[in-house]
Structures are given as C-alpha cells and as structure tokens.
Image: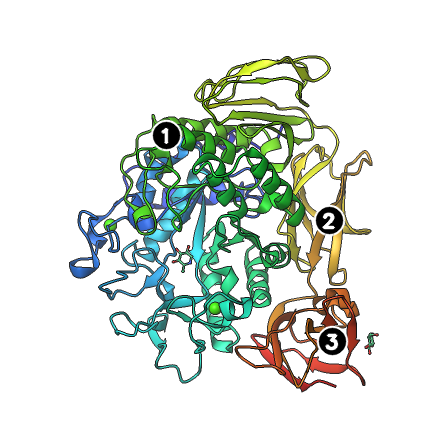
C-alpha cells in the first residue's frame, strides 16, 4: 500500500481534528501537535508529489478577525477598492480549515501571501501592500494578517489537519521607490530597527542601476523590477539578512517555500539560499519564473535543473489555458508541451502546474462555459507535478488582470461541480501513486480528444477528455490497465462512464460524448523496489534525503550513491530516509536495493555539494572576446566544474555592474575553501581558450559573500 495520509491519520486518531472554538492553541492542542509531528512521515516537507496546493491571497480569502483590519485609507470595508486591504487574515484561513472547507476539498497544502511586515503607505495609483509583495521587515508579521502567535497557530491547526503551509518569500526586493514619494522609498527594517531606504543607502544594500527593460538576463537581475527597490544580494548584510529571515520562518514550522521573482536574482546566489534552507530544515522550495503564452527559455530549465529548487510550471499553465480556456491551441500543442517539459526538466514531477494564479486573468471567463474550468481542473489534478488550485477557482470566480483576479471569495459552496472534481481527484492523488510518480503517455489523440495514461509500478490511471461539442469514435485504444471493468473515478461528474479492458489491453471502439472527462484507475501491489521520488535533489554529506516509492519491503536493504552505501535512518515499504555519504562533490545516481537483493532503477543527478555554500563574485578585467565568445570560470571543485570546461560556470555578464571588456558573475562555492581556477573564453562553437600561466587561487569566506578580481592572462 502506498502511504495514504488519510489512513495514516486515522491510525493516529487524528483525522480532521479542529480546535474547539477559534482562539488560542491551548496546551492540549500543542500536545496533539507534537504527537502528530513525531509521527509525521519523513517525506512530509520534502516530497509534495502526491499533494495538491491551494493558493490563497491572504487578504482576500476570509476575514476571521475584524480587529486587525486597517482603518482609514489603507482599508476598503466592502472591498470595493481591490487595491486596498479587504480584511482577510490568517484567522480566516484557520477558520476555513476548521470548518472543513479545505479538508473536504482534499487539498493538502496552502500557499499563503508573503507573511512579512509590509509598508503601510498608500499610493493613489498603485494602492497598498494588501498582496504582501512590498515587505518592510522580513523578521516580523504583516499585522493585517495577524501576529506571530496567530501565524504559529495557523501552522499548528494546519498540521493537525494534515495540511502543509507554504509561504511566499520575496528576497528580490522590498517595496516601490516612487518618484512622487507617496510610498516608503523601499525602506528596510530588521527586527523593528531601521536599516536603509532606497534613497538613504550609504552601504549600497540596493542596486542603483535603473529599471529593467527585460532585454537581457543580466538587466533583469541587476536592475529594478518595475520600481521595486532591488536588493543587492552580494552585499554581506543583505545576504545574511535574507538567509537569517528564512531560517526564522522555517523555525516556525513551515513546510514549503514559494520564491518570488527567481528570474530577477543571481541564479548561483539563489543556490546558496537553497543550500541554507536544506542545511537548516529541508522543505519543498519552488520558484516563480514567469513565462507568457508560447514563451519558453533555456535559462528557465537551467534554473530548474541547477538551483536545487523547482519552478511553478508556467509551460503547463499557459498551454492548458490555450487548449481549454482560449481555444487557441489543441491537444497536439498540449502533448508537445508535455514532451518538452519531460525532456527539459531533470525532475518534471517536482514542478508545480496550475491553470490560473494572481498574475493572469482567472481561468473562468465571465459569462463563459464553466465546463471548461471543470475539465481543466480534471487535467490539472491528474497531471505530473504538484497541482496548485488558485482560491476561488472552485467557485468559478472571474476577473481580468490584477487586481481584478484577486477578488474576495464569493462563497464557500461545497456543492459546485468544480469543488466535487477537486474532491474526487485529490483523494485519487493520495491513494494511487501513479499520479504522483508516474510518467505521462499519450494513448489516443486528435485536436479535441486526449487520452493519456500515468503509470508507476503496478499502478495505472487512464484519463480521457473530449473538450469539444462533437462526438468522436475512439478506436484502437490500448492501456496498461489490467483486464476488467472500471468505473469512472469522477462518478459521472463530468459525464464520464465506465469502460472494459480486454485481456490484450485493448478497449473496444466507443463513442465519446462532448465535454466529457473519464478517469479510470487501478491501484496495484508493487513488490519490487520502484523509486518514485528523491527529495531534496541537492545536499551536502551528512544531510538527510528522503526516497519515496513502492515495494522497498519492510526489511531494511541498502541505498547507494554511485557505489557508496548511505546509512539508513528509517526504512519502510514506501519511504526511506538515508544520510548523504561522505563522497566528493558531484552528481550521483541513487539506487535502492531491497533485502532480497533486487535493485530499483536509478534516480540520476543527485547533486552533492562540497560543503556549506557561500556566494562569491568573480570579476575579470580586460578580457576582450570575439563575436560569440563569452567568459566563464572553471576550477578544481565540483562547484567550478572540476576543471571540465563543459561544466565551466557562466557565461559572465558585462553590461551592468561591470562593463566590457570587464566581466563578472556571482558563483556558489564551498565556504572556507582554498580553490584553484582559471577564467576561460568559450566560443559559440564550443572552442575553449584557456588563460595562460599558473592557476589562480582564492580562499573563500567562511560565511557570507566574497569577491575575487583579476585581469585576464
Ligand atoms: C510576482 C508575484 O507573483 C507578483 O504578484 C508580484 O507583484 C511580483 N512578483 C513582485 O513581487
Ligand atoms: C588543470 C590544470 O591544473 C590547469 O592548470 C589547467 O589549466 C587545466 N587543468 C586545463 O588543462
Ligand atoms: Ca481581518
Ligand atoms: Ca534583482
């Protein structure tokens, strides 16, 4: 049996416990919390593959405590002004967990707005910080969402109800520095004390390079996003401030982090941030790299594969909107997106798909056909990756661009079709591991009909969707479902029907009705080790890593990183905790061998870092290059490619902080290490030009950031 959180909780007598009344976690409740966390499965915070996230704009979900609502200009009582605070708060989320609205829906995580103290000034055009993306003090709570005690209570009530808490973290910037002075000049506080503001910045904690026009990756990173005061993460104080802040929130028990604007910060600095998180308390971490419709980007995939964090799946989100909302593409385009993302992401099941969010018009179109929303939710919830449902989509909330797409919850109706579809499929996600770990295979396709199969071990889910108003004959369909008759998991909610699979895996020709979704499933018993997921995918020797899957057996076997055995912390049929062995930095295949000597397929590409990571800026002056040639760095540690120019780090930048023929790049490196390296020029065609002379040497700082400057040799 795969791990089923409901069965698991029932075993503990913990299913759907709410705290009686809505205030104060008393000592009894805290006892329940520690009991629950003592029994929390190892993969809880590092494996979200069978979870469904519910994304909440904290100010817009539910007002559970009107005492904390802002008065005067900052607030809007009836929420008639969507750019002001409307009263929603953490108590409101607690209330809706306790009322059963979220647990009955079956979502297993909430992603909430950035929880930090934000600026309180009001701008006559752009409004207020109701969304939470204008932080002032990352160490304190946004008072309009609640105080720290309420935050802790949210975490504990969520955990008692087996719901994970994901916070939105915004290490790119503070708040807007506006020319009309209406806001707070991007001011930063630390634990209540003033630190600096954008125009009072003697230590250069912020970038002062103007705003980005998005024309280059470098400009996106080192110039301001809109007019937001852009942190210089290379400054030791800011580096430390942001890392200390996230550790503080990790200590409050959060289970996941959504990182804002990852396309706007140095990628290798972010790798040091992720290392800090995994070294302190590993939790599932995913970034927001916005892509518009039909946009793709090699840097996007590189980030997802290298940074140690996952990404919100904008490729999936934009494509499904074209196929089921805007009807500007069809299932062939969707299939192409599935193939691309499976090929480009090292771990496609760790990405976070969605159908809408707070940065695009809502999926449901005003006056449109809500069946399209229902069908899209069915596809989303049977997708690879961790589906995220945007609050109110289950109530068919409509709205255009921000802030119109952030209206208050219109109702908490648990009988909408969308609510039922989510309910049925969240249950399937936690009972059939094919949805969490399986790959996605096309079984039948035309522009309107897509039939796809998810399979893991002996578990199979077959999904059939006809988006159109036409009937189609489906012939020649084959499946991995064993012979037998299968009812529609959605119970006909989207007009689905049962199907019969013949002994040879074929399904007889059938007429597929309009706007219909069928979900058929088989949950098997996997008796040989099938490794579905490893989390995190990056760490240091001594870190704990969680391996999830099926058929590991109840007797301890072995886990190997390459050919080195890892010590086992805990072992069950579906989850193993192991310690990363003391191997050199590098990429390793991980395998599980059960007590009978049967070995799983390898999980490839686990990255072992060579110790705690710091960020150092390499600057090389006077490096003139030919057209198409770029500067990189390569050296004697894993982080610098172990002298392999194919793994050289770069390309360096040369436009904003330093200008051609001077180049720079912020690089993650092991702390307190003596390293040797050289700069290299690499041409478009791969030709490598090494510097002459002996190797350069650099001792990295033990803590925080460093810098090395040299002249090309
Ligand atoms: C992306 C967030 O999702 C968006 O809502 C926010 O305004 C920007 N980043 C800036 O923080
Ligand atoms: C390692 C050597 O130590 C270094 O000097 C040389 O530049 C690289 N290999 C490339 O050959
Ligand atoms: Ca309130
Ligand atoms: Ca930036």
Question: Which is nearer the N-term, disc 2 or disc 1?
Answer: 1
> What's the mark number on residue 369?
1
**Residue 192 shown left or right of residue 222 in the figure:** left
Q: Within 10 Å of the Cα at label 1, are there few (<14), some (14-19), or many (20+) other Cα atoms?
A: few
Residue carrying label 2: 604
**Residue 364 shown left or right of residue 680 in the figure:** left
Mark 2 touches mark 1? (CB < 8 Å)? no
User: Residue at the location (55% across, 77% down)?
Assistant: 655
Q: Nearer the viewer, residue 450 or 44?
A: 450
Helix, strand or loop at disc 2?
A: strand
Residue 596 position (above or below residue 701): above
**Residue 28 shown left or right of residue 711 in the figure:** left
Q: Ligand 2 within 8 A of label 3's CB?
A: no
* Label 3 vs label 2, nearer the camera: 3
> What's the mark number on residue 680?
3
Residue 266 position (above or below residue 302): below
**Residue 430 horizontal/vertical position (percent):** 54, 32
């Amino acid at each position: 049996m795969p791990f089923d959180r409901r069965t698991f909780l029932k075993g503990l007598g913990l299913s759907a416990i709410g705290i009686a009344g809505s205030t104060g976690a008393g000592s009894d409740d805290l006892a329940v919390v520690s009991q629950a966390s003592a029994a929390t499965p190892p993969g809880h915070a590092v494996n979200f593959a069978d979870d469904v996230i519910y994304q909440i704009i904290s100010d817009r979900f539910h007002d559970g405590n009107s005492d904390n609502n802002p008065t005067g200009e900052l607030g809007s009582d009836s929420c008639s002004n969507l750019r002001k605070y409307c009263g929603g708060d953490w108590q409101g989320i607690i209330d809706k967990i306790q009322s059963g609205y979220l647990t009955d829906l079956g979502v297993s995580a909430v992603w909430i707005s950035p929880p930090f103290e934000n600026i309180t000034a009001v701008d006559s055009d752009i409004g207020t910080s109701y969304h939470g993306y204008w932080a002032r003090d990352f160490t304190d709570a946004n008072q309009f969402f609640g105080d720290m005690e309420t935050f802790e209570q949210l975490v504990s009530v969520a955990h008692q109800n087996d719901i994970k808490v994901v916070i939105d973290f915004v290490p790119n910037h503070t708040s807007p520095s506006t020319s009309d002075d209406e806001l707070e000049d991007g001011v930063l506080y630390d634990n209540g004390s003033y630190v600096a503001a954008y125009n009072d910045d003697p230590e250069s904690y912020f970038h002062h390079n103007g705003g980005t026009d998005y024309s280059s990756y470098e400009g996106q990173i080192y110039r301001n996003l809109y007019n937001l005061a852009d942190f210089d993460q290379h400054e030791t104080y800011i580096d430390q401030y942001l890392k200390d802040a996230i550790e503080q929130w990790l200590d409050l028990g959060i289970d996941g982090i959504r990182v804002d604007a990852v396309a706007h910060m140095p990628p290798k600095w972010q790798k040091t941030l992720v290392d800090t998180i995994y070294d302190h308390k590993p939790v599932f971490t995913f970034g927001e790299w916005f892509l518009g419709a039909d946009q793709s980007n090699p840097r996007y995939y590189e980030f997802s594969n290298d940074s140690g964090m996952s990404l919100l799946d904008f490729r999936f989100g934009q494509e499904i909107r074209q196929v089921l909302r805007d009807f500007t593409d069809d299932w062939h385009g969707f299939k192409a997106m599935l193939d691309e993302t499976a090929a480009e992401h090292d771990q496609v099941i760790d990405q976070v798909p969605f159908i809408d969010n707070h940065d695009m018009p809502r999926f449901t179109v005003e006056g449109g056909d809500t069946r399209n929303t229902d069908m899209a939710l069915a596809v989303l919830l049977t997708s690879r990756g961790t589906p995220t449902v945007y609050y109110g989509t289950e109530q068919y909330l409509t709205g255009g661009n921000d802030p119109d797409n952030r209206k208050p919850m219109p109702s908490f109706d648990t009988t909408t079709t969308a609510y039922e579809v989510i309910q049925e499929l969240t249950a399937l996600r936690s009972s059939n591991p094919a949805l969490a770990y399986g790959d996605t295979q096309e079984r039948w396709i035309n522009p309107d009909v897509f039939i796809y199969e998810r399979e893991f071990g002996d578990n199979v889910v077959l999904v059939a969707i006809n988006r159109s108003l036409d009937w189609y004959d489906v012939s020649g369909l084959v499946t991995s479902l064993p012979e037998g008759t299968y009812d529609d998991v959605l119970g006909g909610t989207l007009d689905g029907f049962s199907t019969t699979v013949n002994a040879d895996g074929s399904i007889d020709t059938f007429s597929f009705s309009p706007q219909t979704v069928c979900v058929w499933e088989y949950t098997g018993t996997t008796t040989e080790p099938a490794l579905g997921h490893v989390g995190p995918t990056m760490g240091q020797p001594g870190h704990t890593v969680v391996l999830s899957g099926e058929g590991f057996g109840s007797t301890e076997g072995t886990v190997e990183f390459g050919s080195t055995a890892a010590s086992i912390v805990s072992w069950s049929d579906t989850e193993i905790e192991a310690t990363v062995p003391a191997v050199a930095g590098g990429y390793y295949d991980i395998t599980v061998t059960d007590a009978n000597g049967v070995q799983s397929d390898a999980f490839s590409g686990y990255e072992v870092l060579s110790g705690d990571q710091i960020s150092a800026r390499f600057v090389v002056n006077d490096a003139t290059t030919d057209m198409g040639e770029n500067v990189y760095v390569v050296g004697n540690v894993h982080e610098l490619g172990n002298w392999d120019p194919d793994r050289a780090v770069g390309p360096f930048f040369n436009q904003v902080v330093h200008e051609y023929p001077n180049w720079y790049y912020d690089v993650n490196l092991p702390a307190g290490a003596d390293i040797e390296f050289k700069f290299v020029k690499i041409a478009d065609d791969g030709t490598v030009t090494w510097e002459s002379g002996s190797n350069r040497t650099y001792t990295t700082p033990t803590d925080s950031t460093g810098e090395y400057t040299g002249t090309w040799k």
